[in-house]
Image: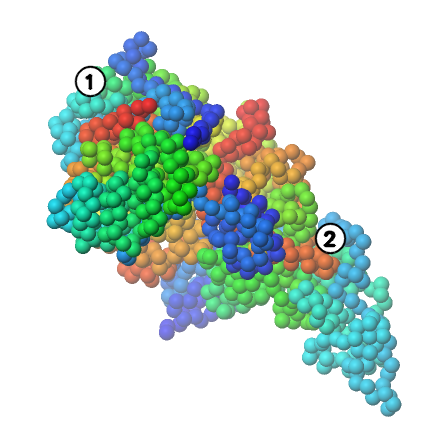
Amino acid sequence: MAVEIPKDTWTGEVHAVTLGAIEADGGTRTKTVTVGGEKTLPFMHFEGETPNAPVVAVEIKDRRPDDWSPLLEEAWGSAMDDPAAWAKAAEEAGADLIQLSLSLTGSDGNPTTPQAAVDAVKAVLGATGLPLLVFGPGQADLDNELLVPVAEATKGERLVLGLCEDKNYRTIAATAMANDHLVIARTAMDVNLAKQLNILISDMGLPLERILMDPTTGALGYGIEYGYSVMERLRMAALQGDAMTQLPMIVTIGIETWKTKEGKVGDGVPEAWGDWKERAINWETLTAVTLIESAADIVVLRHPESVKRVKAAVTDLMTV
Amino acid sequence: MALSGIQIYKLLPQTNCKDCGFPTCLAFAMKLAAKQVELSACPHVSEEAKAQLAESAAPPVRLITLKSNGHEIKVGNEVVLFRHEKTFYNKPGLFIRVRDDQPADAVKAAVAAVDAYTVGYVGMDLGLDGFAVESVSGDAATFAAAIGAVRTVSGRPLVLISKDAQVMAAGLGAVDGEQPLIYGADGDNWEAMADLAKQHKAPLAVIGSSLDELAELTEKIKGKGIEDMVLDPGGRDLSTSLVQATQIRRLSIKKNFRPLGYPIIAFPCDAGDPARESVLAAQAIAKYAGFVVLGDFSPEKVYPLLVLRENIYTDPQKPIQVQPGLYEINDPKPESPLLVTTNFSITYFSVANEVEATGIPTWLMVADAEGMSVLTAWAAGKFDAERIAKSVKTFNVEDKVSQKRIVLPGHVAVLSGELEEELPGWEVKVGPREAVDLPAFMKQVL
Amino acid sequence: MAEHTVTFDIADEPVVVPTGTMLAEAARLAGIDIMQPCGGQGRCGRCAVQVTSGSARSRSAQRLSPEAIEQGFVLACQTVVEGDLTVVVPPQEKVERRLTTDRVAAEIAVPVGYDPHSAQTIRRFSLMLSPPDMADQTDDWSRLETALRQEADIPRLRVSLPLLQRVGAILREGEWQVTAVLDTETWDCERCLPRLVDLIPGRVPHTMPLWGAAIDIGTTTVSLWLVDLITGKVEAQVAEYNGQIARGEDVISRIIYAGKSDDNSREMRELVLGTINELFEKACKRVKASPAEVAKVTISGNSTMMHLLLGIPAENIRLSPFVTAVNQIPTLSAGEVGLDINPEATVDCLPGVASYVGADISAGVLSSGTDDTDAITLFIDVGTNGETVLGSREWLVTCACSAGPAFEGAGVRDGMRATVGAIEEVWVNANTFEPTYRVIGGKQPRGICGSGLISLLGELFLTGIIDKGGNFNVDLDTPRVREGEHGGEYVVAWGDGTEHGRDIAITRVDVDNLLRAKAAIYAGFTVLADSVGIPFETIEQMLVGGSFGKYINIEKAVDIGLLPDMPWDHFQFLGNTSIKGAYLALLDKRSRRRIRDIATRMTYIELSADNTFYDAFMSALFLPHTDLSRFPSVSEAMTTKG
Ligand code: SF4
Ligand code: FES
């Protein structure tokens, strides 16, 4: 019996967004990474094109973090003391992108200075040819204070600056616009909020081709279902032609996974949780792959083994 | 095609007699459209209307039940492609594969471990559903013996795997009176397998290498009077299985294509590598499988999958809530201030974001207000002094903070007196009404 | 228990109260009425008094500034007496009166073809009885019944004992000529015997009015129309603030207050009865009648008001699963309800649908004709509860979307009711960002009322002073946009031009409150339309009710996404549809039956049951809406003005 396979016909498609700039284009990257461009739901190769595979960014910090899981310390070792070395190690671990998170304070306990932030970014840019995403420490004032000089000092690199949020998007969007960078618009697990922030940022004049959106997700067991459904809905809206949702999506899975008890802790947890390391890596990998299948274009991870597994899964998923 | 509330309403008597337990016929019609009630609840529907409504009421994915002594698992009956459109109803069964070429003791030990396994997750006890016993030996007696061994330690439902009808018959004989899943029928053995399914009133898994072949087989088997079937479309890699599962679900939901209107069975156990197996199983859970067969059991593999299954199958129509609890913002110390709010996600996020932005280390207690915002919850009696005091106790707040002072949202200043009574020895402070005013308040007052 | 003396500066004598007495209660005992607009919950800060000596303990001093606390100000509703006290009561803010229904109110059209004989249940008959004598010893009552049978073909009657006790005297006083007023039929007992409502000695000329009244008990305002049931004409329209305001501005506060004790519940009942009885006095005086002549009253109002009026516990209205004690109230008499009119008068409380969709909405549907048209109609009562009805002759669905009181000027820093001194409309120059405004009463402004807020929000948005998310653009080159204590704000009037000498401004928090209110109302529309699966475009008319309704500038309301973007001619403003509905039900028994049907067949959609409303709300929480394609005329306006 010949079954007629129903194919969805979509009128919209996701913008292709290129991260990083090579020398010819005013940057110093040895390669660029393009995400987005989907013309159909994730991996429905039989009905539409998925021109760019989802990619993995590895999160590193400007200094050895105080609160990361021992499993991560074990994995990265001394590279964690030097952002440049860490970036190299991440590249070797298979990262497509490097995501540098600036710390709230230096190791001396004083707030991170703009100069220190610029130095860290430059060091990473010097150590790897991969495109770079730079996140502020997550406090509106400090983010603005650090990201503006970083953006200015790296004009033309097409860095991705994070994070624009609904109460604090103007400064970052403005500096991205002035210095040829990209931004991430982050909203709290809601389709409408995501769309609203995209509208606000694009109303400022930043083209949609330079915005990634982060609809926020919880890790497995901690609200993954919200992130999952919000991404499915956003992607469907995009394919249905809603311009303000046609942006590639990024989710910061590493930070979410490694703050859960399942990831972070090995002692004093139920025996039924099983082997710590394997469980933790499973936690990060499954969170990532599940969200990739729901439409994530960039997943930010922390453990090198998860990077390997997620990349293998993506290869499998992209096979037609 | 599913009818809308108004379309159904037009077929009802429109007398608003309330016999169905709803205030109006339209209210009943809407519930019916949402598949939350049965048509039979209205005693006054005409025969003609009944006939018209029955068609729209049949589930596009058939409900399949496996039964054993004291256990039952139901899968199927799904009505949407994406969980946000309504919800996914019946969680896929997670089964552990057991091979009959293993020594009986090894089988028993493995099965006993799985049978006993439970893991706590947000107040629930999660566990696996049953076993898939596979005939590797090809020998009927060995197969029956292995099944017997399983049954000595676990009563959970079974999937029986063999393509040899004689072996299968022996297997079924070992669990007579139960309703295991027979796996399975293919182009060669389907007639014999269908006979067995009929004889044992057990559902039958149908194996095909393409959707065309599957649909043809299910139609033939249906012709033999078998209604309960499960599909194995054959894909074993992430890309093929995702596409196949999606196509099958689409055909049944959007086209009401009956030959493929059955649950799917997936075999991540065939992946070979445990890391890849986990990823395949996760996909099967999110993307439409009814039965998922896993290889060897290990808690670190199973626990994440059980949690994922809970997450994907939670009802997305419930207001987005954050888990009630004591949240740490900016690494609080025992002497840091304590704020309280409700577990409505937007409320939580707006408070948490403002506090986070101040950089002030803070404890934020999120009380269970059934996912309502502060004012709504207060109006509805879900955020009162009693509930707040209860949260303080449940979350052992007293062990974590050294300063017994709690800051109430300004909108519920009214609760301060009662809360002082509920929490003797505590100081109750009234904070601002709006989250945006928190930073100023915290800097000046706390 | 220890007792303390509390001396209030404005009271005649000190009062003695036990430890732990609430200061507000002590004041009441001293004969001082302290306003408690939030129902004594410490939320509004309007019950502040100054303790000049002695000891008191306050639970909450929220809403008081540090300086005020320093000076000894406390909230009377949050403070308990713990020792002898001396208290200064500051002058209480007077409720301003500018109610539209007054002498100047527009005349109300009598329904076409009104015929009391066929429509009215209250009938009046002049009867000539033959006097008794030794040959005819028939009892007085039978004599009355016989006369009625002969005159009006009414064989038998019901009567209450108090009236029966007076029958003999009345017959003799009128020398066997009397006028009988009957209620011939009630909606809940169509086959019951007619009931004697009044018996008047002598012959009342048939041109004399026969009085009935339609009442709308609003949370804020109570309105009463005095109607001549013979002609159907409204002869007097009066209105007054609901006396319960002193014990809570919103329904939730009042439910909580009334629920605290039987005394409180009785007090609430008496407060609203006081207001109604005052209105009867006033209206009757105007037409030179006596309240005792009123034979029938039809009452409309939201479910909470109805429960509180009748002294029926209202707690379950606010508590999940939100059920009323009763939606269809049986016919009552004025005596039992507590109205100071003829105690035999029929009191007909109109039916409601649910906790937050009350008789006022059923009445609104009736008077707006939403239930009697083929055109798909959206009817909204713009107010705190934002009740909305969608439907036509075939079906009706309804919901209430708790918009909050922002559009009534509450919960907004410089918000106020639409009374003298309120800015009611604002225009902002797109280049200079300077405003022009209109003030009710034409004098210096004191605040901004709901319509002013709508127009201001629209202007701020179209001129780019706020972005679509409501964030102020503080980089603009104008002193009017500045950083205030709640983030950005815009100064509408500088202090040197205002009545109180303070700047009048709209703050970030105000904008958020207004956005939430408008989003809730618009989301209600969307959910209703979705619930029955009809596209928004198929809505053929949009009826706006509520006394507030008539002041809204449609264009601005559409600009901010409060009302849907529809052609102008789809909109119709109806004013107080609740009292109009009560009036129709008072006049015509067919209308009364119709409103019963309306309440029975309206399908109530509970918005908190699932996420649909939340989603619609979030998407409406933007200017004008996250989905701009729903507001084509606004996108156009943005390109021209912005
Ligand atoms: S029982 Fe039937 S006729 Fe009666 S209200 Fe329910 S649906 Fe309508
Ligand atoms: S604060 Fe006391 S009555 Fe409102």
Q: Nearer the viewer, mark 2 or mark 1?
A: 1
Determine the image quadrant of residue B427. Answer: bottom left
Crowd class of label 2 (few under 14; some 14 to 19; many from 20; radius 10 Å): few
Query: Does residue B179 appear left or right of residue B146 in this picture?
Result: right
Q: Position of residue B207 (x, y in %)?
A: 32, 36
- Classify the position of the N terminus of chain C by image quarter: bottom left
| Chain hosting mark 1 | A
The answer to whether residue B289 shows anywhere in this view is no
Up-down relation of residue B436 to residue A238 (above or below): below
The answer to whether residue C390 shows anywhere in this view is yes
Q: Position of residue C137 (x, y in %)?
A: 83, 88
- Classify the position of the C terminus of chain C by image quarter: top right
Up-down relation of residue C49 to residue B215 (above or below): below
Instruction: Give the tally of numbered discs.
Output: 2
Q: Position of residue B97 (x, y in %)?
A: 22, 42
Kind of residue at badge 2: Arg
Residue behind mark 1: A127
Question: Outermost residue, top direction?
Answer: A24
Q: Nearer the viewer, residue A80 or C630?
A: C630
Q: Is mark 1 within 8 Å of ligand 2?
A: no
Kind of residue at badge 1: Ala
Tell me the element at label 1. Answer: helix
Residue behind mark 2: C103
Determine the image quadrant of residue A282. Answer: top left
Tell me the element at label 2. Answer: loop
